[in-house]
Image: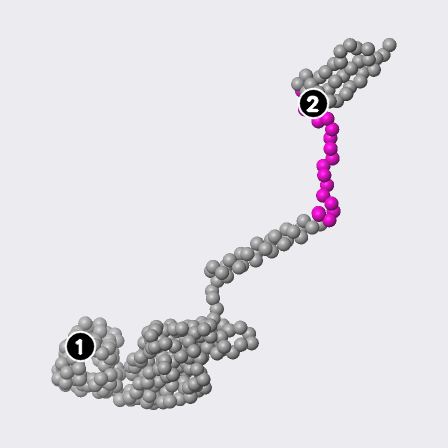
């Protein structure tokens, strides 16, 4: 007679009973064969995301990627990006001030408005001029508390920055974006005025920050050396910042002797570059320096104290 086996699952243990048996059989996971213990009782299907979620995943990735790119761009601008001083579209140069000074109603002769700043810490400029041997004047602008910023011209006014405008004989001329400039021959006066990047004029107590200097004119008469039995002699007179005759080039042959006879209105030192010859100059007393031009090349003769170019020696 065939007996039917009935099994009932109760938690971790399994109870098996045979009809008519006095004691039910109990089996635990430890007593089952190893393969049976490892086999899961049931196999559940893997959850599948809804189709809408699967479609949204690429969009989320794109949004995250765009956010990362934007963050990197903002970081570059905030930390390493270059600041700009240019004004916003729709605003004028004068409105893009950034709170720099006080914009006055007063204008200069060319129509540029003045921008008032305190005298303490205001920019300043002075001019050094030197005749050019090919005509005109080489002008050196010496500024303090000021920096030339050609890359920002047209932007907002920032204290201590901008450019210079040159007025030759009272007429507005070119702009200077650096310390050196050339003024053509024939000019008599030169005025240098400091401007902000927005083209307003830096001013102190209602007056433009500027300097005016007279020009004696471009050199027209070259130095005329006098030939003697002992060589050639060049006579030069220095009065203030004026050199007469105007600096030019003296042509010499190698081995030729030359005498520089200089009269200065102040104590100074004459120096011949390349030959390293010097001569102390006493106020009002002519001084002479004689040497043999035994080296070829171009050599400048200057004064140390006033920094004036007296002449140039060309030895061939």
Describe the element under mark 2 as helix, strand or loop.
loop
Q: Which residue sits at x=74%, y=35%?
A: 45
Q: Residue 52 magenta-drawn?
A: yes
Question: Tag 2 or tag 1, which sits nearer the N-term?
Answer: 2
Relative side of 56 to 113, left or right: right
Mark 1 or mark 2, whichever is nearer to me: 2
Q: Position of residue 268 (x, y in %)?
A: 17, 78
Asked whether residue 224 is in view, the answer is yes
**How far across and down, in percent of the image, does residue 77 sit?**
50, 61
Residue drawn at 32 percent across, 76 percent down? 142
Residue positioned 15% across, 77% down in the render = 279
Q: How is the image coloured?
A: one colour
Q: Which quarter of the picture shows residue 203?
A: bottom left
The front one of 130 and 51 is 51
Q: Which mark is residue 269?
A: 1
Report the number of numbered marks. 2
Give the residue number, with chain letter if any, for mark 2.
12
Q: Image quarter for residue 112?
A: bottom left
Task: Classify residue 311 as left or right of residue 183.
Answer: left
* Residue 210 x/y as whole percent: 35, 82
Q: Which sits in the foreground, 76 or 141?
A: 76
Q: CA distance from mark 1 to mark 2?
A: 112 Å
On whether residue 26 falls in the magenta region, the answer is: no
Is residue 254 among what the camera can see?
no
Image quarter of the N terminus: top right
Residue 48 vertical position relative to residue 64 in the rendered view, above or below? above
| Magenta span | 33-54
């Amino acid at each position: 007679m065939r007996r039917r086996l009935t099994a009932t699952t109760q938690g971790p243990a399994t109870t098996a009973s045979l009809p008519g048996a006095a004691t039910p059989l109990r089996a635990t996971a430890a007593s089952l064969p190893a393969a049976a213990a490892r086999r899961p009782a049931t196999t559940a299907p893997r959850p599948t995301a809804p189709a809408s979620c699967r479609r949204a995943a690429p969009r989320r990735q794109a949004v995250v990627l765009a956010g990362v790119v934007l963050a990197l761009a903002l970081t570059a601008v905030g930390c390493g990006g270059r600041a700009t001083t240019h004004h916003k579209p729709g605003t004028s140069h004068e409105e893009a001030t950034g709170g720099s000074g006080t914009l006055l109603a007063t204008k200069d002769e060319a129509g540029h408005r003045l921008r008032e700043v305190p005298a303490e810490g205001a920019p300043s400029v002075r001019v050094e001029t030197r005749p050019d041997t090919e005509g005109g004047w080489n002008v050196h602008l010496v500024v303090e508390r000021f920096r030339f910023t050609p890359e920002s011209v047209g932007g907002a006014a920032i204290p201590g920055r901008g450019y210079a405008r040159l007025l030759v004989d009272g007429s507005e001329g070119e702009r200077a974006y650096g310390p050196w400039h050339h003024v053509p021959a024939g000019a008599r006066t030169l005025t240098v005025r400091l401007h902000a990047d927005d083209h307003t004029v830096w001013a102190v107590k209602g007056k433009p920050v500027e300097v005016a200097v007279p020009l004696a004119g471009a050199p027209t008469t070259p130095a005329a050396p006098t030939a003697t039995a002992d060589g050639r002699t060049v006579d030069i007179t220095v009065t203030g910042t004026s050199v007469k005759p105007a600096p030019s080039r003296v042509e010499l042959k190698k081995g030729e002797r030359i005498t520089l006879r200089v009269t200065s209105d102040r104590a100074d030192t004459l120096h011949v570059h390349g030959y390293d010859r010097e001569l102390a100059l006493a106020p009002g007393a002519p001084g002479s320096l004689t040497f043999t031009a035994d080296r070829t090349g171009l050599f400048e003769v200057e004064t140390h104290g006033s920094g004036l170019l007296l002449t140039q020696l060309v030895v061939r």
